[in-house]
Amino acid sequence: MQKNIEAKAVIEVSNLYKDYQTAAGPFPVLKDVNLRIENGDYVAIMGPSGSGKSTFMNILGCLDKPTKGKYVLDGHAVATMEENAVAGVRNKTIGFVFQGFNLLARSSLLDNVALPLVYSGIEKPERHKRAKVLLEKVGLGKHINSRPNQISGGQQQRVAIARALVNNPRLILADEPTGNLDSVTSEEIMALFGELNKEGITIVLVTHETDIAEHAKRQVRFLDGKIVQDTLTNSQLAEVL
Amino acid sequence: MFTAMLGEAWHAMGANRLRTFLTMLGMVIGVGAVVLMMAIGQGAEASVKRSISAMGSNLFVVLSGPPSMGGARSATGNAPSLNVKDANAIAELDGVAGVAPVTMGKAQIVFGSNNWNTDILGTTPSYLDVRSWYLSSGYAFAESDIRSATRVALIGKTVAQNIFGDDIDPLGKTIRIKQSPFVILGVLDSKGQSLDGRDQDDTIIVPLTTAQRKLFGNQLPGSVRQIIVQAESDKAMAMTEEGINGLLNQRHNIREGADSDFSVRNLTAIANSAAETTRTMSLLLGAIASVSLLVGGIGIMNIMLVSVTERTREIGIRMAIGARQRDILMQFLLEAIVISIVGCLIGIGIGVGGAVLVSIFTKAEVIVSTNSVLIAFSVAASIGVFFGFYPARKAAKLNPIEALRYQ
């Protein structure tokens, strides 16, 4: 059964609703969202502010829970999982990359990258070995003992990506990963994502910049809590044709 | 995993050293105070206990009553109302283990060019048994010395020190008490201070009859100042006291309801109440010190709450990359425990150091027991857990999304 599902989708979302509780009563953010993302896909989620794309992303990352609807991740219905199992999913199945990098300011880059491994119960020598390999992969092998405030924003985002990759996740979720970066650095980061996707990692990223979204294979557009468009990107179309 | 978390806790403490130090200070002072107060209290208890065991166990003292001259009553113990025959009669009572009639006075003693004024105690050989008083050298006088009122003496450590010094062995030497020569048969073991602080080694013991006839004279033939009575056991005390009262009332022809010409005092009860007082005192000291421990614990809780709020975002990040609730809980709990335990270790050091200083400067006895250190340590660890738990749980229950958005 497991094998069967693996061949199919990493993410399967059906009839998903999310309401925020406000003083004026429930406010719907996501209304009946349905989405299926295949293994190895590279999806850009787009849409204006308030369209619900970030909320959707948080639900995909198991950081938030939907009000109603079904979310099957890697063959498991997230709603039925208990808290510790969800933490395990965040730890092993998903790698999250944030707009604000979200590194621990007090820890070295090496410790930052190795942190998820602490929560998977891996011993220190192995943790450091794996973190070092990944820091080298993102081009920061020489800075392993630096602190996050000693390197540039682009470098910090690379560290965050290394941290997301350290537990060999099947899925990378990136919420506006280039939002705080200049255009040159953004291109470098997107190139890195492209490489990772070629290695077989499924990538879902949220952005509101069209040129960033062009790096993906598929674009999903949100408006007022609904998916209004789901197309292949131009580059992908060109390849298909 | 655990060592990694311990490292994190250490790291977090190092990140804000002054704050960590001040938080710890509450623990340091609390534990230091507890260790020091317990040391002082236990020292006081021990010295009282030693005084009690030096006094002898299950003791009564029967004092003669105050003499009454035309309505003016003098001090207790001055009337010649008790005598050796009373003592012999008491010895026949059930439950009595030993009896020693005592007469006493002060006298000047001389050896060579040294002289000294001390207490002279006239009694029978059983006195030493009753008081559990042993000789450090020589031997005691015997019943035959009582019968013939020989001039022999047992000398206390303080007296020996003062008239013989360190170099001369007092055994067999002849001293003069009130101009009469006395041969020293033995040197008494050191008894130390009595409960009221009197030096019990500043004493010379001579046969009862010698004291009565040759030193202090006698108001009535055979009269004594007091009779010391030892009961066979703790349980026999009440019965013995009743027996003595009945017997002496009968012997002295005291009618029911009339004033007795003697009084019976339970020395053991007095000693026990002294012990009880010190125990209460050390409990009180401990209780006061524990309050500062409590305050220290609240300080830790306060800082941990601030720390959780400050690090809300960090908690969010940790949750987003896979920390379980119990990981977050453990992280903050460990931090609180590490602060308490490190503070506790420093506090134990300060408490022990303080105890040493107190004993040096006040000469009072202080005892730092392993128990008191263990108690302080376990209480400190529990305080870390108790006061660290609420903030840690608060951190663990945070919603990851809200924590990540926290600015």
Image (cartoon, helix red, strand yellow):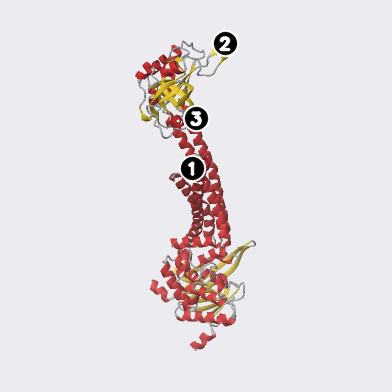
Q: How many labels were placed on the picture?
A: 3
Nearer to us of marks 1 and 3 is 3
Estimate the x, y position of residue B259 in percent, counting from the top left. 52, 14
Residue A148, picture quadrant: bottom right
Label 2 sits on residue: B70
Estimate the x, y position of residue A25 in percent, counting from the top left. 62, 62
Relative height, residue B353 to residue A40 (above, below): above
Q: What residue type is labelled 3?
A: Arg
Residues at marks 2 and 1, CA–CA distance in whole angstroms: 55 Å
Residue plotted at (49% across, 78% down):
A138
The quarter in which the N terminus of chain B is drawn is: bottom left
Q: Is mark 2 on a helix, strand or loop?
A: loop
Q: Are marks 2 and 1 in contact (CB under 8 Å)?
A: no
Residue plotted at (42% across, 35% down):
B166
Q: What residue type is labelled 1?
A: Ala
Residue A155 seen in render = yes
Label 1 sits on residue: B39
Label 3 sits on residue: B198
Front-lying residue, A121 or B151: B151
Pointer 2 or 1: first along the chain: 1
Residue B131, picture quadrant: top left
Pointer 3 or 2: first along the chain: 2
Nearer to us of marks 3 and 2 is 3
